[in-house]
């Protein structure tokens, strides 16, 4: 196979530090890190809320789950962004509980009797699946050759398109209001639209300092307006405790049962595909070279942090797409900003009152910001697809069929209702269904092809970086 030489940024400017590895001043680290907190908070806490409510936990137990989740999110994010040994991608990736595992964990917990007894079985499955992910990471990373740009671009586009409806739902008032008169009210839509327009206006001003915190400005301004109009409730802040730490095995020692372990291991295999897409996405955004070793380190990070999640009364972890979109929007690429966000998450995890303050941001305000961030994830996928020859019928079919499969659970919600619960839990995720479709179609069409157009992989793409004296990456020429 003919190889194409690659011009590295190190050869062009050896004295330059890559933006991903740039250590910013402490005030900027704190400011940009807090923006990541605001962007991810709602999605981070909704998973323990969904699982806790489904298993019938008390309000006190539910609060404990949320604090444990925030604490573990912080630890997981630091491990993934900072890196320890061969663990962690060393990229600006914020970790949070994967939505893919919600339905299986609820099914496992209810099957074990619900309540804290159900949680113990869930934690046993999470810990075991995390260990399996850690051990399987180097083998999975060797499958990267089956993730050419057509697959990665399709997966990221599906992730963005699948998550945009979540932002739109928040813009209408949130899932709690579905079926109520307030859902989709003019006031909620005004909050969402106002937040989105303010973010766009700040970016349009073209001031790098303001653009880098545009999302935070929109969220703070939207929340302030809602508070002035009496639509923000701070009662939960007053009722929350000042200090609380999640201790290992708070609910008791985990229980290890075979079928739940198998189900959770399958879920983690699916999240490994999602993580691979996220790693390539952040590499595309930051112009940082990504290879199989990077993917392996990221997957080990997912495995280790999932084990930590099971020990600290939380759940499996994966990088969050909205924060990838935020990196794209803000153009702040330093992984140390994400490390700072991880430290702030730990603070929120041990200070319930501080966490409750952030949780007071209204859903419509979050929805307005989420639309732009989720859309950015889809935009990165489309950007990668721009490198693919879609005039080639096989590539076009991979994209077309995978998009259809990915949008199926969103467009036709009851489509898989008659399937067994375990099968339904997997197929009900558009991200999972679309990603698996893209991978299998690529194997079917291209894995055994000898045509040169099918042999080009990520290592064959030459990216010529343009670096200015400030260390910014205004663009790249792909050859």
Image (cartoon, helix red, strand yellow):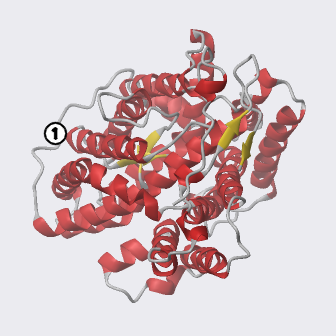
What is the crowding at mark 1: few (fewer than 14 residues within 10 Å), some, or many (at least 20)?
some
Q: How many marks?
A: 1
Tell me if residue 258 comes above or below residue 462 in the rendering: below
In-front residue for pair 184/34: 34
Residue 62 in the figure: left or right of residue 123: right
The quadrant where residue 403 appears: bottom right
Residue extending furthest toward the right: 205
Residue 265 image offset from top left, x and y in percent = 25, 61
Q: Report the residue at 53% width, 61% height from top.
A: 148
Residue 474 in the figure: left or right of residue 289: right
Residue 233 in view of the camera: no
Q: Report the residue at 52% width, 33% height from top.
A: 92
Residue 15 image offset from top left, x and y in percent = 61, 14
Read off the residue under disc 1.
249
The quadrant where residue 312 appears: top left
Q: Report the residue at 50% width, 85% height from top.
A: 415
Tell me if residue 350 comes above or below residue 310 in the rendering: above
Residue 164 in view of the camera: yes
Tell me if residue 173 comes above or below residue 262 in the rendering: above
Tell me if residue 428 comes above or below residue 468 in the rendering: below
Q: Report the residue at 60% width, 65% height from top.
A: 150
Residue 173 image offset from top left, x and y in percent = 66, 55
Residue 4 image offset from top left, x and y in percent = 60, 49
Residue 430 in the figure: left or right of residue 262: right
Q: Secondary structure at mark 1?
A: loop
Residue extending furthest toward the front: 2
């Amino acid at each position: 196979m003919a190889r194409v030489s690659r011009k590295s940024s190190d050869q062009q400017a050896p004295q330059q530090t890559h933006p991903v590895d740039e250590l910013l001043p402490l005030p900027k680290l704190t400011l940009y890190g807090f923006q990541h907190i605001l962007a991810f908070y709602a999605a981070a806490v909704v998973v323990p809320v969904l699982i806790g409510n489904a298993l019938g936990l008390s309000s006190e137990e539910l609060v404990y789950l949320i604090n444990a989740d925030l604490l573990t999110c912080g630890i997981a994010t630091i491990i993934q962004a900072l890196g320890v040994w061969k663990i962690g991608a060393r990229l600006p990736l914020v970790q949070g509980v994967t939505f893919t595992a919600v339905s299986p964990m609820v099914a496992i917990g209810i099957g074990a009797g619900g309540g804290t007894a159900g949680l113990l079985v869930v934690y046993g499955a999470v810990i075991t699946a995390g260990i399996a992910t850690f051990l399987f990471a180097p083998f999975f990373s060797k499958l990267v050759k089956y993730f050419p740009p057509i697959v990665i671009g399709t997966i990221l586009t599906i992730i963005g398109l699948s998550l945009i409806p979540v932002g739109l739902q928040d813009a209408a008032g949130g899932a709690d209001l579905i079926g109520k008169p307030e859902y989709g009210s003019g006031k909620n839509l005004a909050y969402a639209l106002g937040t989105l327009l303010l973010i766009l206006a700040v970016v349009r001003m073209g001031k790098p300092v303001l653009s880098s915190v545009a999302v935070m400005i929109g969220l703070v301004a939207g929340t302030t307006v809602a508070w002035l109009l009496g639509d923000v409730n701070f009662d939960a802040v007053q009722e929350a405790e000042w200090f609380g730490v999640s201790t290992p095995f708070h609910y008791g020692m985990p229980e290890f049962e075979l079928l739940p372990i198998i189900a959770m291991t399958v879920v983690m295999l699916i999240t490994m595909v999602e993580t691979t897409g996220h790693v390539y996405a952040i590499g595309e955004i930051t112009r940082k070279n990504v290879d199989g070793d990077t993917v392996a380190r990221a997957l080990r990070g997912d495995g280790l942090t999932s084990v930590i999640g099971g020990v600290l009364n939380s759940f499996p972890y994966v990088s969050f797409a909205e924060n990838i979109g935020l990196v794209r929007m803000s153009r702040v690429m330093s992984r140390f900003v994400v490390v700072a966000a991880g430290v702030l998450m730990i603070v929120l995890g041990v200070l319930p009152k501080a966490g409750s303050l952030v949780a007071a941001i209204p859903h419509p305000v979050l929805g307005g910001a989420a639309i732009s961030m989720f859309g950015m994830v889809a935009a990165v996928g489309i950007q990668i697809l721009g490198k693919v020859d879609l005039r080639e019928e096989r590539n076009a079919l991979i994209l077309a069929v995978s998009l259809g499969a990915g949008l199926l659970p969103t467009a036709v919600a009851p489509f898989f209702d008659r399937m067994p619960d375990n099968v339904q839990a997997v197929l009900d995720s558009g991200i999972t269904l679309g990603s698996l479709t893209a991978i299998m179609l690529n194997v079917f069409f291209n894995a055994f092809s000898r045509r040169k157009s099918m042999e080009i992989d990520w290592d064959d793409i030459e990216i010529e970086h343009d670096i200015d004296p400030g260390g910014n990456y205004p663009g790249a020429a792909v050859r």
